């Protein structure tokens, strides 16, 4: 396996810029996920790494070797597509072994590798079955087997679980990560599904409009979003945003939101007067009768151990995740207390996070080009 290094990567289709100045490193043996909405540039980036698209600018290094302008056949990679791309007239054994047959490998070695790979994927009992009669999860395992059997430098996967139903997808998320832990393969995985990304990734790059808004571990991205887009895209429900006006002075530790004073982490630098937003995740809000930040219960979503409560305030709907045993009725008046150590501050215009005492380690990679909060 090998490290993948992307430097100032850019791709334009005429006047449309699909990927803008992307920079990241996928470590040897790392499971790296590119996450973002449709059209954000993640698949285009993956195709450039694979050699299926040639970049307009920048550099791609695979194992320290510059492969930027090499075609796909000249790179030692394996690509797993969303639509399995299996040969329906071949059985499982022949599908998995086809890449080795095309390379002219001796039959006895092909057989050994195919059986070894099938056992790894727990489909050795299916080797002589037709792929057309397999369930979706098993067909995806066959597609993975055809990639693994080649033992390439890295695996590239473009939404490989996108066509599976929920049950199979949940199973394959677990099995893909378990497989990665066993073979320590360098993997670049593209998805629009945050659950897949957060469940499997060692590192995540969140993309929007061709820009990497944030690069980091799942915990860094969830706990310290670099932009409002990341904060809104990651999390279910996403982060709440509470607007407030005026600037912030260095050392400020309190703001006023909807008439209520809210303690905030110490600001490390002066922030010019601007349209600001305070971000707080639903699980970091609790009910407090003494709080001046108040509203009426708008609706609830019961989740078994917890419930998501929508509270209509003077500044809009705020969602809180609270214990399921709390009894609530539509129209009930409640006070909301915010955890001061779990707040984020953003400039609405740029969408960028403001540095505070607990945000010194915010990953701002690409955030200088970040877009304002969608909507």
Image (spheres, rainbow, N blue to C red):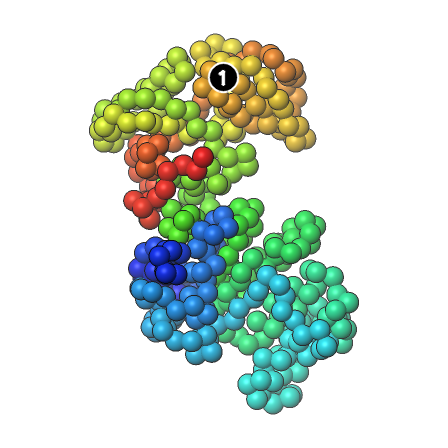
Quadrant location of residue 358?
Answer: top left
- Judge from the rendering whether residue 225 lies leftward or rightward of residue 109; answer left or right: left
- Image quadrant in which the C terminus is located: top left
Quadrant location of residue 330?
Answer: top right
- Vertical arrangement, residue 103 with respect to residue 204, above or below: below
The residue at the point 45 percent across, 43 percent down is 219
- Judge from the rendering whether residue 325 lies leftward or rightward of residue 234; answer left or right: right
- Image quadrant in which the N terminus is located: bottom left
- Judge from the rendering whether residue 111 lies leftward or rightward of residue 234; answer left or right: right
The residue at the point 66 percent across, 83 percent down is 111
Q: Which residue is mark 1?
A: 313
Res. 54 in view: yes
The residue at the point 35 percent across, 22 percent down is 244
In this view of the protein, which residue sits in the foreground, 102 or 373?
373
> Horizontal and vertical percent for residue 91?
73, 76
> Horizontal and vertical percent for residue 323?
61, 24
Toward the front, the furthest residue is 15
- Vertical arrangement, residue 88 with respect to residue 368, above or below: below
- Vertical arrangement, residue 296 with respect to residue 156, above or below: above
> Horizontal and vertical percent for residue 138?
70, 64
Res. 248 in view: no
Within 10 Å of the Cα at label 1, are there few (<14), some (14-19), or many (20+) other Cα atoms? some
- Vertical arrangement, residue 284 with respect to residue 201, above or below: above
> Horizontal and vertical percent for residue 188?
48, 61
């Amino acid at each position: 396996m090998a490290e993948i290094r992307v430097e100032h990567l850019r791709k334009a289709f005429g006047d449309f810029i699909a990927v803008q100045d992307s920079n990241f490193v996928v470590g040897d043996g790392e499971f790296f996920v590119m996450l973002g909405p449709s059209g954000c540039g993640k698949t285009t980036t993956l195709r450039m790494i694979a050699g299926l698209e040639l970049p307009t600018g920048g550099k791609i290094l695979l194992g320290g070797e510059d492969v930027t302008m090499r075609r796909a056949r000249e790179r030692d990679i394996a690509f797993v597509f969303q639509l399995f791309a299996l040969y329906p007239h071949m059985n499982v054994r022949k599908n998995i072994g086809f890449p080795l047959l095309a390379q002219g490998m001796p039959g006895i070695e092909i057989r050994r590798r195919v059986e070894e790979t099938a056992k790894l994927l727990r489909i050795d009992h299916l080797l002589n079955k037709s792929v057309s009669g397999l369930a979706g999860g098993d067909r995806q395992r066959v597609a993975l087997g055809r990639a693994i059997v080649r033992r390439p430098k890295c695996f590239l996967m473009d939404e490989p679980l996108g066509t599976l139903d929920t049950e199979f997808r949940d199973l394959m998320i677990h099995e893909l990560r378990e497989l990665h832990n066993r073979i320590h393969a360098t993997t670049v995985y593209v998805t629009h599904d945050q659950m897949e990304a957060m469940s499997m990734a060692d590192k995540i790059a969140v993309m929007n409009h061709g820009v990497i808004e944030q690069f980091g571990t799942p915990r860094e991205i969830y706990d310290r979003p670099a932009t409002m887009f990341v904060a809104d895209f990651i999390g279910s429900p996403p982060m709440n945003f509470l607007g407030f006006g005026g600037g912030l002075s260095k050392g400020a530790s309190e703001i006023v939101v909807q008439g209520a004073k809210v303690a905030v982490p110490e600001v490390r630098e002066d922030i010019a007067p601007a349209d600001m937003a305070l971000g707080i995740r639903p699980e970091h809000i609790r009910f407090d009768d003494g709080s001046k930040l108040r509203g009426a219960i708008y609706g609830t979503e019961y989740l078994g151990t917890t419930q998501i409560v929508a509270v209509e305030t003077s500044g809009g709907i705020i969602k809180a995740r609270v214990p399921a045993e709390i009894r609530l009725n539509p129209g009930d008046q409640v006070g909301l207390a915010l955890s001061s150590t779990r707040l984020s501050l953003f400039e609405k215009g740029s969408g960028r996070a403001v540095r505070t005492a607990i945000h010194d380690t915010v990953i701002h990679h690409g955030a200088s080009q970040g877009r304002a909060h969608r909507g």
